[in-house]
Image (spheres, rainbow, N blue to C red):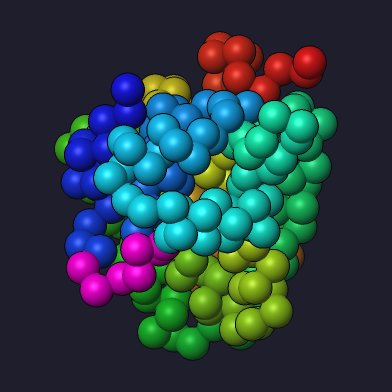
Amino acid sequence: MIDWARLDQGIGDTAGQPASSRIRQWLIAAIQDGQLQPGCRLKEVELVKSLDVSRTPLREALAGLRAEGIVDSDHDGLRVRRLDWRDIRALYTYRGMLEGMAAKLAAAHAHEAERRIIEQLREEEANHISRGVEAAVLAGHNRRFHHAILQAAGNPFLAEGLERLSRLMVLLGKTAYSLGDRVEAIAGEHQMITAAIMTGDAGAAEAAMQAHISNALEARLTLLNMSGIGEMD
């Protein structure tokens, strides 16, 4: 049984949101938490009962997840989308191109205030790591760091592409911060990216970001190999 109450605590205040939006967030949280595994069938009757919701908003939420590529369908109904290793490599290759461009543009064009925000986030990350905060907190901070760089890049079309991509990242399950030896490495990579942005070295910022994403792919494949998720059929 999925512990929806525990997942709800991590989502935050959803008061005032449409029912379909709240359901979408619950399903996303269950996928990220590993309680809904890739390939898992999403049975409408069971979800209506366990979530204590009506069919209409549930169907709206599932339709939205299908449009985002998080859920797909087969002869047996809707399932959480399963990514194989080739899919994941392609996803990270695309991510490396987009995030590399974001770092390059941020280094070239960011306002001084935006550079300070990026540096502040990097310093906060170092403080979190020194205090031994949990992986979920580090993962959330990581998203803020990358988002700040994207905003500093100042390209709405690039932001749109990365937004679509980020929605698919939930299918990968647990964060690479769960790999103990990866935590310090990520901090070091973030420091190199930040240093290049702070000095306005666009080429170095792009290269540092692409190396960071390449290392993230290696860590991701390590996690998948350890868990068995994402194996080829």
The structure residue drawn at horizontal position 44% and vertical position 85%, both measured from the top left corner, is 112
The structure residue drawn at horizontal position 53% and vertical position 78%, both measured from the top left corner, is 152
Left or right for 18, reference 185: left
Q: At which x and y percent is residue 151?
A: 52, 77
Q: At which x and y percent is residue 163?
A: 59, 65
Q: Nearer the viewer, residue 71 or 168?
A: 71
Indicate the quadrant where residue 107 lies.
Answer: bottom right
Left or right for 44, reference 169: left
Tell me, yes or no, if residue 90 can be seen here. Answer: yes
Left or right for 147, reference 140: right
The structure residue drawn at horizontal position 81% and vertical position 31%, both measured from the top left corner, is 86
Left or right for 157, reference 58: right
Task: Please identify the quadrant where the C terminus is shown.
Answer: top right
Residue 96, compared with residue 114, is above or below; it is above
Q: At which x and y percent is residue 198?
A: 50, 71
Q: How many marks?
A: 0
The structure residue drawn at horizontal position 41% and vertical position 68%, both measured from the top left corner, is 118
Magenta segment: does it hold 223?
no
Tell me, yes or no, if residue 174 can be seen here. Answer: no
Task: Please identify the quadrant where the N terminus is shown.
Answer: top left
The stretch in magenta equals 15-21
